[in-house]
């Protein structure tokens, strides 16, 4: 039990990655605040984390697409957290998004607009206080657009760029912004997909990596949970466009 006085806020508490991350913080002695739109499922996660660790775990309702409620959400928390982590995301259906603008907009807004607006609001409050760490879970899908998931990928690219700019803005004040690119993770989001074992992490691995990175123990502000992904994505990024556009990735 080290960081007994610290509080973390996890946005997206029904997510497999979110649950594992909150558990890792609770095991490290942090007070845990959870936010989710599905309170019933999130309450089960909150109870489980509290029972397994003895940590104080509180849960708050939040739909990240309700932009006009985000400020009130941040102001009504019992305490401004030391670390806020956003794992909210929605892969959506690429084929459907190509012809259904509402579906595409939901994917854009869930992966980019909502998380960016909320992290921006916490950044302002952290600046006023003079401390705080922001962690955004983005994706390798945002590193280069691919024909099979570019709506999700474009939204994640937007979130990655937002976090990069926020980091640049907050760094002179000593505040940290960490971008997490999990690679493949065995969760509800990837259920049914055939995933290569070397490139696929378990949610617990992601939770431990987030805690380590947020506490400065990974030596980087932008982490690929499994470092092999950094190499994979630099190769994919280096493929010239004339060749890339002929590949089915
Ligand atoms: N699994 C992977 O391979 C992988 C790879 C790279 C990045 N990621 C990213 O990792 C993060 C966590 O994903 P996961 O794998 O744990 O999948 P997940 O279980 O589907 O988690 C997605 C989370 O986003 C929440 N959410 C969606 N729309 C929301 C809204 N409008 N308001 C509030 N919460 C909302 C979901 O809540 P509900 O339960 O209410 O739907 C859920 O908690 C996501 O950002 C995802 O893009 C995952």
Image (spheres, rainbow, N blue to C red):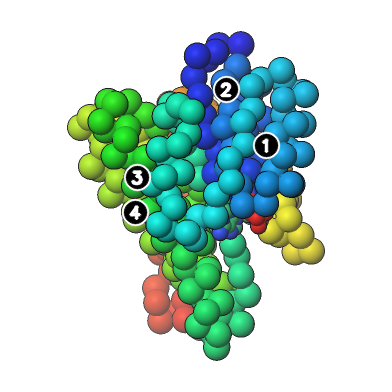
Inter-mark Cα distance, 2 to 3: 21 Å
Front position among marks 2 and 4: 2
Q: Quadrant of residue 188?
A: bottom right
Mark 3 sits on what residue?
121
Disc on the earlier residue, 4 or 3: 3
- Give residue 236's position: percent from left, percent from top: 48, 63
- Give residue 88's position: percent from left, percent from top: 55, 52
Inter-mark Cα distance, 1 to 2: 15 Å
Mark 1 sits on what residue?
20
Disc on the earlier residue, 1 or 3: 1
- In terms of depth relative to the viewer, which is nearer, 120 or 189? 120
Question: Disc 4, ligand 1: is the CB inside 8 Å?
Answer: no
- Apparent side of residue 119 relative to residue 172 in the rendered image (left or right): right
Pointers 4 and 3 in contact (C-beta within 8 Å) = no
Disc on the earlier residue, 4 or 1: 1
Disc on the earlier residue, 2 or 4: 2
Mark 1 Cα-neighbour bin, 10 Å: few <14, some 14–19, many ≥20: many
Look at 45% across and 37% down and name the residue there: 76
Image disc number at residue 191? none
Mark 4 sits on what residue?
162
Mark 3 Cα-neighbour bin, 10 Å: few <14, some 14–19, many ≥20: some
- In terms of depth relative to the viewer, which is nearer, 59 or 114? 59
Disc on the earlier residue, 1 or 2: 1
Q: Secondary structure at mark 3?
A: helix
Quadrant in which the N terminus is drawn:
top right
Front position among marks 1 and 3: 3
Mark 2 sits on what residue?
31
Residue 79 shows in this picture? yes
């Amino acid at each position: 039990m080290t960081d007994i006085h610290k509080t973390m806020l996890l946005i997206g508490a029904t997510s497999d990655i979110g649950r594992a991350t909150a558990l890792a913080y609770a095991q490290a002695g942090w007070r845990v605040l959870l936010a989710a739109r599905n309170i019933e499922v999130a309450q089960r996660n909150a109870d489980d984390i509290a029972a397994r660790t003895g940590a104080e775990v509180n849960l708050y309702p939040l739909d990240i697409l309700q932009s006009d409620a985000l400020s009130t959400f941040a102001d009504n928390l019992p305490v401004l957290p030391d670390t806020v982590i956003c794992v909210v995301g929605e892969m959506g259906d690429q084929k459907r998004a190509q012809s259904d603008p509402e579906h595409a907009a939901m994917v854009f807004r869930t992966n980019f607009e909502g998380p960016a607006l909320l992290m921006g609001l916490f950044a302002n409050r952290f600046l006023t206080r003079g401390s705080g760490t922001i962690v955004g879970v983005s994706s390798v899908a945002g590193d280069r657009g691919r024909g099979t998931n570019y709506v999700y990928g474009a939204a994640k690219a937007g979130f990655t760029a937002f976090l990069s700019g926020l980091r640049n803005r907050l760094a002179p004040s000593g505040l940290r912004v960490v971008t997490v690119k999990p690679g493949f993770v065995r969760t509800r989001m990837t259920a049914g997909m055939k995933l290569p074992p070397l490139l696929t992490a378990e949610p617990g691995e992601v939770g431990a990596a987030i805690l380590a990175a947020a506490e400065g123990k990974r030596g980087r502000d932008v982490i690929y949970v499994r470092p092999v992904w950094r190499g994979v994505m630099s190769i994919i990024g280096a493929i010239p466009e004339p060749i890339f556009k002929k590949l089915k990735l």
